[in-house]
Amino acid sequence: MADLPLSIGAALNVAELPTYREWLIDGQRDLEIQDFCAPKVLLGDWQPLVSKAREHLDGFKGRLGIHGPFYDLPLDMKDPELAAILSRRMVTAVDAAAALGATQIVVHSPYKTWDWFNFGNNPRAGNTPSTAEATIDRVHHNLSAAVTRAEAEGITLVIENIEDIDPSWRRALATSFGSDAVRLSIDTGHAHYAHGTTGAPPVDYFVTDAAEMLSHVHLQDADGFADRHWPPGRGTVNWHAVFRAIAALPQRPHLVLELREANDIPAAMDYLSGEGLAC
């Protein structure tokens, strides 16, 4: 259990690192590099990008992660040809993270709003690929090579909520691997969207449900209608409840501002520090 305020960092592209280098290094803050989610990066020669990031981060000793690939690559991919592409891409992401010196990779939850309303909608559920159990089986198949590589490299894949309505589903998925290399991430804006639009519990409930499995948090504000990525204080997330829930955990997850505009970081810090929540 930690006391408030909590130290937080940011999710940034490599090109944005020079602007925030001093802030990151002075506080040895948590950092997530986001360039690696772009298909063109991991499909090409990503080594120069790693070298550029390491150059900008000379002197940085904080906790470091990357955002992994997700565009058109759901973790529960059914098509075997496409699943093979997903598997290879995730292994490449682990290789890139290892070269960078990162210890986390953010990946996206496979659970859709449709799943919540339809997993129990088939009397032959045990024989259809749309069951919750079949989803877990497909994710295991598709991520097995990446998880094995991550275990060898000391890297953790953290599964971020996207459309999730019931946070316990994602927790069960992560737990099912039985590996320290698979844990949970929470995006506060995604959770707030799901709360306001599809009846999910409020954001702090996501934190409490994740409990000791929570290793990473994207901090962004929203209005409960869309995925805004606003700086905290601009939307309607109950930040006091969220930070109290995080502070009550036995571990401190990586905490990074993931904002649509990086130049909103000072406004976010002003608000959260003014509320006594972050520093």
Image (tube, rainbow, N blue to C red):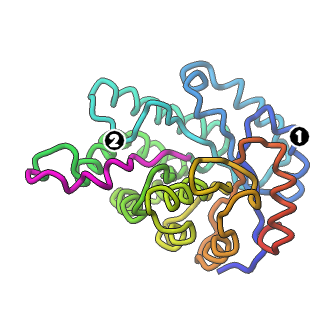
Q: Which mark is residue 76?
A: 2
Badge 2 amino acid: Asp
Q: Against 37, is 63 above or below?
A: below
Q: Is residue 36 one of those drawn in magenta?
A: no
Seen at 64% across and 75% down, the residue is: 241
- Residue 102: give x, y in percent of width and height: 64, 46
Query: In the structure shown, which secondary structural element does the residue marked by tag 1 occupy?
Result: helix
Is 258 placed left or right of 21 in the picture? Answer: left
Seen at 58% across and 21% down, the residue is: 40
Evaluate whether residue 253 shows in this view: yes
The residue segment tinted magenta is 106-124
CA separation in Å, label 2 and label 1: 37 Å
Residue toward you, 145 or 124: 124
Dots 2, 1 in contact, CB < 8 A? no
Badge 1 amino acid: Thr
Q: How many marks?
A: 2
Seen at 67% across and 72% down, the residue is: 243
Is 166 placed left or right of 14 in the picture? Answer: left
Residue toward you, 109 or 118: 118
Q: Which residue is mark 1?
A: 19
The image quarter containing residue 234 is bottom right
Seen at 61% across and 50% down, the residue is: 103
- Residue 10: give x, y in percent of width and height: 74, 51
